[in-house]
Amino acid sequence: MTMSMYRASVPVFQARLKGLAHCLRIAEANAAERKIDPAVLLAARLAPDMLSLTQQVQIATDHAKGAPSRLAQRDIVRFEDVEKSFPELQARITRTLDLLDTFEPAEIDGSEERTIEIKGRTRDLSFTGSDYLLHFALPNFYFHVTTAYGILRHNGVPLGKPDFLRRD
């Protein structure tokens, strides 16, 4: 059976965003339990030159909404990066999940050879749809979701692999 571009994108983004939301709920509760200002976790980084937890979540959601939009030839819905709390990050994830629910398989399936062009900060990129999804969008998405998880674990939030893989 051939894997569709829709099945390789939208449900994957949905599942991992739900897992990320679950991890953020645990982190918020853990911060309250340990009497840690949530802002400390939200600003946490794995290394000084890496982005904060908040930025990791923002970028993960940007990839989750940008990839199917590009594949479906839709305008990308922009979210301002203004989140400063766990509830605001949860709301951003919810808005992203709501947007993902609007995509139909027929919009994305068949986009394997569609040209996807991205204006980068230092250079422009051009891909076929399948190369874009498999070698750019999904790896970037997973990088930011995994880094968010790593930041939380590094800061003592009691998470495990089942939390990361959770889908509800």
Image: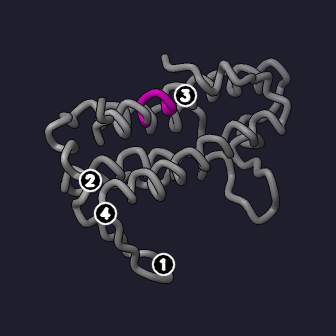
Can you tell which quarter of the image residue 41 is in?
top right
Q: Which residue lies furthest to the left in this view?
A: 106
| Camera-side residue of 151 and 67 | 67
Query: Would residue 10 be counted in the magenta stretch?
Result: no
The residues tagged by marks 4 and 3 sit, at their Cα atoms, a distance apart of 31 Å
Can you tell which quarter of the image residue 9 is in?
top left
Magenta residues span: 13-17
Q: What residue type is labelled 3?
A: Ala
From the image, tell me which residue sits under label 4: 128
Measured along the vertical axis of the image, is residue 139 above or below residue 5? below
| Camera-side residue of 59 and 35 | 59
Question: How packed is label 3: few (under 14 Cα within 10 Å), some, or many (20 or more)?
Answer: many
Circle 4/circle 3 CB separation < 8 Å = no
Q: Which amino acid does label 2 sit on?
A: Glu
Measured along the vertical axis of the image, is residue 21 above or below residue 145? above
The residues tagged by marks 2 and 1 sit, at their Cα atoms, a distance apart of 25 Å
From the image, tell me which residue sits under label 1: 121
Q: Earlier in the sequence, mark 1 or mark 4?
A: 1
Q: Which of marks 1 and 3 is nearer the N terminus?
A: 3
Which circle marks residue 21 in the picture? 3
SS assignment at label 4: strand
SS assignment at label 2: loop
Q: What residue type is labelled 4?
A: Thr
SS assignment at label 3: helix
Please give left or right for residue 26 compared with residue 124 in the image: right
Circle 2/circle 4 CB separation < 8 Å = yes
The residues tagged by marks 1 and 4 sit, at their Cα atoms, a distance apart of 20 Å
From the image, tell me which residue sits under label 2: 112
The residues tagged by marks 1 and 3 sit, at their Cα atoms, a distance apart of 29 Å
